[in-house]
Amino acid sequence: MTLRPILIHPDPRLKSTADPVADVDKGVRALADDMLETMYDAPGIGLAAPQIGILHRMLVMDCVKDEMATPEPMVLINPRVLSSSEETNVYDEGCLSIPDQYAEVERPASVKVEWTDLDGKTVQQDFNGLWATCVQHEIDHLNGKLFIDYLKPLKRQMITRKMQKLKREIARGNA
């Protein structure tokens, strides 16, 4: 397993639509391991392949936050939302590609998602609460959408400027 560098917004790869994964092979399984290791190390609860510069429709997540609880890592390949509730939740979202920035985003409170698992099988599952927010956030990444795209333009521009400054500081070795 290898820790992968996480792209920081703005980066054109974060605004690109990811391509479907054709086959679940050894390379995809190795990528899944790398993505989970990178997500846990960050630390985060979700990571989409475009966030590490790989434009594949693949995400990992684990919304178990209690350190005493058993982790529940999930790998979703070619996920798609089949249905969503009319009821919504507002969650203070953050993103590993937009470090230390949070904003309230309203999304459906529950969603039914279909994906391919690491065995190549089609899976469907209903997600609620934080899991629903997380899976929608990560699927947005696969479609080139960031949580800040839900914000008013002024707030989005302010966060983008902060990220540009952070990237300059990282480039200079000051972060």
Image (cartoon, grey):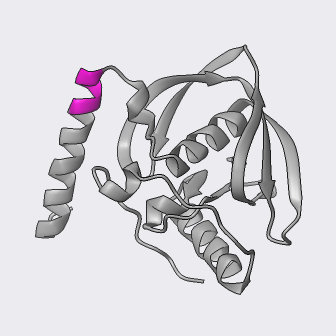
Q: Main secondary structure of the magenta part?
A: helix
Q: At x 60% / y 24%, what residue is drawn?
A: 107
Task: Classify residue 168 by image quadrant.
Answer: bottom left
With respect to residue 85, does 2 lie above or below?
Answer: below
Residue 145 in magenta?
A: no
With respect to residue 79, does 172 lie above or below?
Answer: below
Q: At x 80% / y 70%, what residue is drawn?
A: 118
On the rendered structure, is 138 left or right of 123? left
Quadrant (top left/top right/bottom left/bottom right) for the N terminus: bottom right
With respect to residue 133, does 85 lie above or below?
Answer: above
Tell me residue 34's x, y (percent). 59, 75
Residue bounds of the magenta highlight? 153-157
Tell me residue 165's x, y (percent). 15, 49
Q: At x 51% / y 48%, what residue is drawn?
A: 141
Quadrant (top left/top right/bottom left/bottom right) for the C terminus: bottom left
Q: Nearer the viewer, residue 175 or 28?
A: 28
On the rendered structure, is 167 left or right of 22? left
With respect to residue 129, does 54 lie above or below?
Answer: below
Tell me residue 98's x, y (percent). 36, 47
On the rendered structure, is 53 left or right of 121? left
Q: At x 86% / y 72%, what residue is drawn?
A: 119
